[in-house]
Image: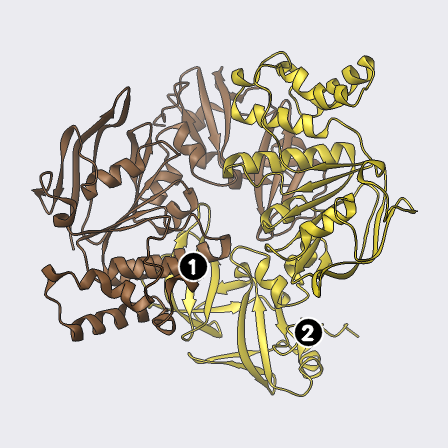
Amino acid sequence: MSHVELSHITKTYPGVTALDDISFDVKDGEFFVLLGPTGAGKTTTLRVIAGLEKQDKGSVLFDGKAVDNFNPSDRDVALVFQQYSLYPTMSVYDNLAFPLRSPLRHTSAEEIRKKVEETAEILHISHLLKRKTAHLSGGEMQRVSIGRAIVRSPRVFLMDEPLSNLDAKLREALRIELQHLQKTQGSTTLFVTHDQIEALTMADRIAVLNQGRILQVGTPEDIYDRPATTFIAQLVGSPRINLYKARREDGTISINASEVHVPASHGNNLPADFLVGIRPENIKPDLKGEFSGRLVLTEPLGVETILHIQSGQSEFIGLVPGITTYRIGDAMKFNVAFEHVHYFGLNGDRLQS
Amino acid sequence: MSTIELRQVEKKFGDLHAVKPLDLTIQDGEFVVLLGPSGCGKTTTLRMISGLEAVSGGTIWLDGRNVTWLHPSARDIAFVFQFYALYPHLTAWRNIAFPLQAQGESPENVKKRVNEVAKLLRIEHLLNARPGQLSGGDQQRVALARALVRRPAAYLMDEPLGALDADFRETMRSEIKRLHVLQHATTVYVTHDQIEAMAMGDRIVVMSEAAIQQIGTPAQVYYDPANLFVARFIGSPGMNLIAGKYADGIVQMAGLDNRYPVPLEWQSALKKGLDGGSEVIIGFRPEAAQINDQGKLIGKVYASEMQGSSAVLHLTINENDIFHIRTDRLISYPIDTLVHFDIDPQMVRFFNPKTEAAIKPEVAQ
């Protein structure tokens, strides 16, 4: 396995800067997720690492050694795509064996059989080995695709939204398996997704990418608890973070157009005008709550319920456990867990406070 | 406004049942969601209500009037397929007014109705803008206003949010519900997304294999699923469903030594519900588990997931079964750690594996 480093990678296409001075490193055995919206540059980054795309500037290093002049086949990376790329007329066994049968590898038939069977076991597809891949379900096909990547123990796994085409239940199941597999095999993995929940649940570390730039690199906890910008704060977390304009005046912080005011001791050193971000779980209904509003909407999801509370002209989205007995139209009292509130400048950058 | 009633409505294609005979009454002002995986019959049911699809049997009643063989246009029902793209060269106002004008409404009525719906959706200040000048969310709101500007007796919606990305879907989900809360128009909404169904529906009709599996409020289908299908389908992850053998007040599960003492109030129900057999399936929601060193159940950590404000721990107990447990985010366990936990006795459920039906608790004496 391998340590991967990207150093000042820039890639331009006519009229567009796809990647703008990208630097990060993926540690040996790490599950690293590139998270960003469509067009952020995630797939381009992956293709540069794989050698399918040549960067204009900067360098890709594997274990400290530049691989910029290596062909894709010499970089020893395995790619898994959103679209399964299997040979439909071959059996699952032959699909898995294919990467090992390359004449350059000199792998004996016995060795191949052993590896294929091991891999099939790990991915729970042993019973499918004789089946033609054309006759598999989507989830089974993606398992085989992953199997074909891991069977030859590459230095690095590059995965480009491999779960996006699967239905919700299957995605959940494979998310867990993939994470377990990665942890038990200790493989260095770079996983690309636009889905914040995939990033939070699977990653050791996340790099948030937008418009070809890295905005933040950190653990899921860093990204969720200390988002560097309002863009990241809104990208991660569901329901979305509440974001308001606020003002500091005469020792009080007031959220604009609402009835929420607090002593400024919660945010010393804040400028006069700024933005306040409150995650829904930090809006806490309480009979003796400090703030008042009216419940305009509830969305029971089962494990929790989303509350939409109108206070003044502003709406506060809250999240409470279980299916609530609050009713739409009820007067509500609530508190805000100010120790978990986020402050941003008007330009969207996090304020240290 | 109107009630919709389906009596023994069915749809057959040759010998194949797309929808088996079903009964369903939708009350005036109610928001009912038809939920199920693709091919379950939900869209066919909706199309039969609209008249776009003829029934093979049964009758459909609108406000007590038999409309089974009435032309779709004579039913006064608006069918919303999806929120179509807006006309880029027209202002938001003209976009919203379009369906009414096409219908030949008087200018006063058009004006009144457009202003009403714009107010409900809080887009009054955007009415003079063209779509290109609006943010994505505002464009979707204008599209929603256009879809809902007519005032039919009922709205039928077929996966209207299906094509939107996750972020807009959440926003539009709450906008549609908000509009419903204000207007109380009878609505039948089709989706395969259980989160959408839970969040929006007054009641949910869970369908699978051309038949209704359960009709209930979000709380009913979540806490008291009628069978294994509903238990699995609702929730993310779904209900934990683990097979075991019941004897003498204990459910013994395969694999790790899991012996679950069945709460007293369930014991006679179980005896009855299992028809003398011992095979049982125990069910509980991930949040019903409480980690506790003295806990009676045990699992081995397979993976753990940080999900934002909380976490989910996945514990294996044998080759096939995994417990999913919702935990505090602060706890972290390496793979293969043994974790003990208990189940909130209020939240445990049991199913008969042969019939797949939920076992009903005995009513307290």
Quadrant the N terminus of chain A occupies: bottom left
Q: Tell me which chain appears yellow.
A: B
Of the chain colours in the picture, the one used for chain A is brown
Work out whether residue B249 or residue A45 is closer to the camera in this orientation and state it.
Answer: A45
How far across and down, in percent of the image, does residue A108 sit?
Answer: 13, 71
Residue at 77% across, 32% down: B183
Task: Give the mark toward the camera: 2 or 1.
Answer: 1
Residue A321 in view of the camera:
no
For residue B359, the mark is: 2
Name the one closer to the observer, A204 or B26: B26
Q: Quadrant of residue A103?
A: bottom left
Give left or right: position of A209 versus A23.
right
- The quarter in which the C terminus of chain A is drawn is top left
Residue under the point 61% across and 45% down: B196
Instruction: Give coordinates of residue B264: x percent, y percent.
Output: 66, 78
Q: What residue did someone put label 1 on? A: A139
Determine the chain carrying the residue at label 2.
B
At label 1, which amino acid type do we have? Gly
State whether residue A185 is above or below residue A326: below
Q: Considering the numbered disc 2 on the image, is that residue within a helix, a strand or a loop?
A: loop
Left or right of A18, for residue B265? right
Quarter of the rendering containing residue B40? bottom right
Q: Amino acid at mark 2?
A: Ile
